[in-house]
Amino acid sequence: DGGITQSPKYLFRKEGQNVTLSCEQNLNHDAMYWYRQDPGQGLRLIYYSQIVNDFQKGDIAEGYSVSREKKESFPLTVTSAQKNPTAFYLCASSPVQGNEKLFFGSGTQLSVL
Amino acid sequence: DQQVKQNSPSLSVQEGRISILNCDYTNSMFDYFLWYKKYPAEGPTFLISISSIKDKNEDGRFTVFLNKSAKHLSLHIVPSQPGDSAVYFCAATYGGATNKLIFGTGTLLAVQP
């Protein structure tokens, strides 16, 4: 079955700690995205990548970093610089830039201890 | 400045009746609109879309209407079923740019048996 796998489902971060959220897709999609969802708010774009070894900042990139070393993988690191990291994080992919239909993973809930 | 607004946080309807979910936007450059459905602890899934050159698009029980002059779109579900209970997000973009998708805050639909 093709799809997007996010892990872990739940993650806890201690103060000053960096944590990395995993996102893997086997849909052979070129573009991948990270979104953040907070209660009562819409999804906001953190970073996106249209091709391997290239990525761009979204609307709320501060305190986050990404890498795209493989087409299938787009991990997100929440750094200690992100002062309000508690949120539901969603990874998505799309076949090519210009196809507006995103395919989402099941998400990771990050909480601060 | 919220460019895509869903002013009703929740909606409750009886099974078999029509559900109408509304969405307003402010950016006149938007030319493509989408609806996503999201169950708790899962990622959103694409439901239906409409281009600005149309005013209606239908897919089974789901119909999206676009009123460009009012900058308003609505999703109609007829007949509503208990399995339709979920959060519905509308989203908008322009120029075919997936990285420019703007999401609304979502409407929680509860379909009562």
Image (cartoon, coloured by chain):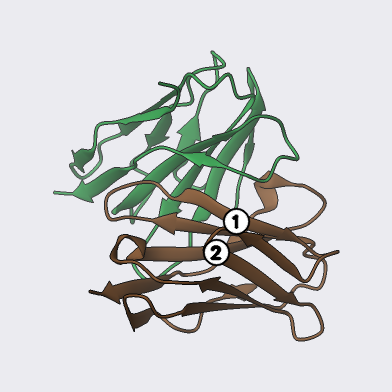
The green-tinted chain is: A
**Element at badge 1?**
strand
Q: Nearer the viewer, residue B62 or B92?
A: B62
Viewed as shown, does residue B80 lie left or right of A33?
left
Q: Mark 2 points at which residue?
A: B62
Q: Chain B's shade in the image?
A: brown
Residue shown at the point (47%, 70%) measured from the top left: B105
Specify the amino acid type for callout 1. Answer: Ile
- The quarter of the picture where residue A13 lies is top left
Q: Which residue is drawn at 58% across and 18% down?
A: A28
Looking at the image, is mark 2 or mark 1 earlier in the sequence? 1
Q: Which chain carries label 2?
A: B
Q: Is mark 2 on a helix, strand or loop?
A: strand
Q: Residue at x 60, y 61 (%)?
A: B91
Position of the C terminus of chain B, as image quadrant, is bottom left
In the displayed structure, A53 sits above or below A81; it is above
Q: Which residue is most to the top?
A: A70
Badge number at residue B48: 1
As rendered, which of A15 and A52 lies closer to the eye? A52
Say which residue appears at 32% left-offset and 75% top-offset.
Answer: B15
Q: Do labels 2 and 1 share a chain?
A: yes
Q: In which quarter of the image is the N terminus of chain B?
A: bottom right
**Spatial CA span between label 2 and label 1:** 8 Å
